[in-house]
Image (cartoon, helix red, strand yellow):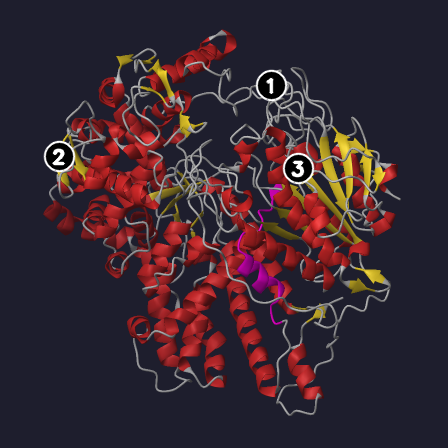
Amino acid sequence: MRTSRLLDSSFLVAGVTAIGLVTGLASCTGDIGGDGPLGPVPPGAEEATFSGARRLTRTEYDLTLRDLLDDTSNSGFALLPEDVNDPFDNDYHTQKVSPALIESAETLAAGAAERAVTSPTVVDKIVPCVASGPDDADCLGEFVRTFGRRALRRPLSEAEVQEYVDQFLPFAVEGDDFLLGVKLVLAAMLQDVEFLYRIEIGTPLGLPGVARLTDFEVATRLSYFLIGSTPPDWLLDDAEASKLADPGLVRIAAEKLLAEDRARDRVDRFHALWLGYHQLPHSAELVAELRAESRALVEKVVVDDRSDYLSLFRSEQTYLSDYLAGHYGYDAPGESTWVTYPDERRGILSHGTVLSSFGKFADTSPTQRGIFIRTRLLCQTIPPPPTDVDTDNPPGEEAGECKADRYAIHSQGGCAGCHNLMDPIGFGLENYDNQGRYRETDDGKPECVIEGQGTIEGVGDFSGPSELADLVIGSGELEACVVSQIYRFAVGRREGAEDDPILEGLTDGFTSSGRKFDELMLEIVSSESFGFRKEEP
Amino acid sequence: MSSKRSLHRRAFLASMGGLSISLPLLEIMLDSKPAFAGGPPLRYLVLWGGQSMGADGDPLVDDFVPNSLGTGYDLKTATQPFATYGVEDEITIVSGLHIPTANGGAVPDGGRADDFHTNNMGPLLTGVKTVAYEKGGPTSDQLVSDVIAGNTVHKNLVYQVQASWYLSVSAPYGRDIISQRSDGSGGFIEVPGTVSPSQAFDSLFYMFAPPDDEAAAAEQDFLWRQRKSVLDLVKTRADVLRKKLGGADRERLDRHFDEIRELEMRINTLPPAPGGECQEIPGVTDPSLGGNQPDGGYDQNVGYSGEEERARIFMDLTHMAFTCDLSRVGAVLFTMAQSHMNMYQLTGQATDLHEVGHGGVPGGTVAVATAQAWHMKHFAYLVDKLRGTPEGNGTVLDNCGIVFLFEGGHGDDPATGNQNSSHSTENMVVCVAGGAGGLARGTHISAPGQHPGKAILTVMNAVGANASSFGEVSGTLPELVG
């Protein structure tokens, strides 16, 4: 699986050409899909995993319009249905179709098309020719050809180009306006099913349901995973030139994508969704400050320092502004800068972002925080509560009781089996409130002194986020879980048994090679099986 | 009431006015101002509020149900808006309703599992028991639409006032769905509502306003042909693509393809012309989307997206959709089940709607009623507007059957054994408005222990659904038909 990583890049560049000549053929067809098996089962095909048509999320939609048309209206966020965050927003199994979706897609396409053709700058960018008049079929065709490749993420066949021209040139003529033709092409392409969904068909192989992705489909997978948006022109050029026909070449392209600022946004978004802080229930100012703190650490670990990923959980420094210093009760640094914690905080579990999440009942929730650690960091499954249990009211509502006493009911009788997996973890974080501030007692109850002692059943005891991080790391399960989480984000679904070999290989590689997170992302896209798909049953 | 659009009616009307435009005259140009040859059509509407009747621990079951039975009932905190709009004599309150629970055993027909949230949505919206949070049948709006939608442009309008789930670390998992239809093979297709008022407006009033002159008519026609042409190509290409898809993707995308075809049919269908009471409402813009609430907590700055304006607009759109016969059936979700929408801007209550029932603000059941009153205000507004809209020898309201459903009641919570709990389906209330099929108007009916599905079935049949049962619920409430 990691063969490519062991090879010298220059060898790869020279050596893949012959492979590309074979495997890249399908990528140059003017239509998605291809014909016939290609002979012997190629490496990676047998490990192909399931993929299904994935609709662009609201975020992906808006980033795609930004990159295609310099359209920064974020219109998709306003009109497209809210994505399900579970925890990632891109699980295609959660996506629903509705009349509202279809109408929104049409409205959004028409609006983006209108904005594009009324901007001379955008027109210059997307129309590669100067029309001789409204009836300039060649120029409209050239626009369809070039923009179509970008919007639909593959070259259009000449028949398709002609179809667009035949459909819309008459309107340009009737309206005596070449740009009307451009606008209608845009309106059609931006609500085309192939635009709204990432549809993979590939080229069938001898294995049932397995297909080799075209290079353009690989480019699309790469791009939406690494930068959350449509493939840039150079990547489409690579696809067209069969430069994505081999894992080593895919890796080279991925490295180039990861060097973009957009990849920083994507890495930040992954962490925010995974760790539950992509939207925080605080004032805009506090949210911005908290998000900046966590983003700074993520970028430092993943991008700038490329340090051991575990330092995300162990960092002794944090990026502190005067505002946040006031929030946490630290000395103001004077300007935003990296400072060494003056107390026991360490890493991202100490951040106000993470500590703000997973609250309940207007307070921290030991149960929810326990679920967070179990499900998000250890990738364990907590059974859902029985349908005859009320999960909607705080335990033990008798006034005057301290929180620890109230939650004691959870460790009794039939509740204990599951709650002992959760609550004792959360109680180890109780000294940190639901904005991440340190506290000695329950909110509003000075008589209730917080002990702050926690346990991960079967793993060990701890106090506070720093010791918790050490315990989670020491469990030996964190690496595999990180791999599973980023894999889910990449493939847009939860993993199944068929993904196990890939996940095991990725985990071995991640653990044994210094836990570089960017390297993990590269390994995902340059695995042999990345270029294949299996149709879901 | 509508016809296939072969030539745009506005252009045709302009040409008939003696203006010269170079468009061919086609044979099908039926203008369809709602004249209702066989009498006005009947309409059906489901409204939904994500709140129970009382607050936890409060022995006051509700501050909603009148003390007196029959007409001329007394108003409570929740129903004060009826007086604001003068619709006490229009809205009927059915009280004492009850969805049975498993109570530790098997879930009875039309009943629910014991955990409250979402387990009660299925029995209430579909009449079918819920074992584990599912909705086991088609919802009443879909059932009614199948029978009475006729040739309307919009078979079933589904709107959603609460614009977001407002919790960042979870998802609504069905708490936002009040409409679903059969997929024809034993399963069900959820129909999420339109969240954007401007989108709903554009959809409803497409090409609705008549052009001022020949040039405007020609322009309108030109724009319509452009839109149709774009959709034609999108559909043609989708049909080609479909043939290349494997089974799972084809199944996944078939709904998308179906909806494209539905949209194409809608824009090819000539809507009834404006005239008389049927007029386009002023244009609308969408209030911006707000941020998330803490789970169970509250922050004044988040969890609100202008739902006050959104609710008003969706009521206006529903009113005009019915008046113009653009649609005969609708479902409007005001607030999601277990709603985390911020109530501060709506009622001054510094908490989210869900927490109002759980003691998030002082006042207990009266506080719940205050939150309910916000829902009732928009309901009463709609009823008043429909009543104020003449149709035939009466009003549009005379030809409506409207039900307003609240998520829960007040009483025993089988999951905890708590009494006086908001997590209860005892003491539920259904409000009914409209005069379709001789529905009783402005009265209070006590129906202790009866399933709310009976009230729903009664209204469904009042608008012509001719159903013998609603899911697993059979029998109607005879008192509800005056």
Q: Which residue is mark 1?
A: B415
- The kind of residue on which mark 1 rests is Ala
Q: Is residue B194 visible?
A: no
- The kind of residue on which mark 3 rests is Phe
- The kind of residue on which mark 2 rests is Val
State the residue at coordinates (26%, 23%): A465
Q: Secondary structure at mark 2?
A: strand
Write down the chain letter for disc 2: A
Q: Does the segment drawn in magenta span residue B89?
A: no
Q: CA distance from mark 1 to mark 2?
A: 50 Å
Q: Which residue is mark 2?
A: A339
State the residue at coordinates (18%, 49%): A259
Query: Which quadrant of the rendered structure holds the C terminus of chain B?
Result: top right
Query: Which quadrant of the rendered structure holds the N terminus of chain B?
Result: bottom right
- Vertical position of residue B310 compared to residue A131: above or below: above
- Vertical position of residue A177 compared to residue B299: above or below: below
Give the number of callouts: 3
Q: Residues within 10 Å of mark 1 (few under 14, many from 20)?
A: many
Q: Seen from this angle, which residue lies furthest top?
A: A413
Left or right: A513, with B246 as reference point:
left
Write down the chain letter for disc 3: B
- Vertical position of residue A140 compared to residue B161: above or below: below
Q: Secondary structure at mark 3?
A: strand
Please report the bounds of the magenta region as a residue range. B187-207
Residue B393 coordinates in the image, percent (x, y): 87, 63
Residue B11 coordinates in the image, percent (x, y): 64, 82
Asked whether B243 or A410 is in front, the reply is: A410
Q: Which residue is mark 3?
A: B406
Q: Quadrant of residue B395?
A: bottom right
Q: CA distance from mark 3 to mark 2?
A: 53 Å
Q: Does the segment drawn in magenta span residue B206?
A: yes
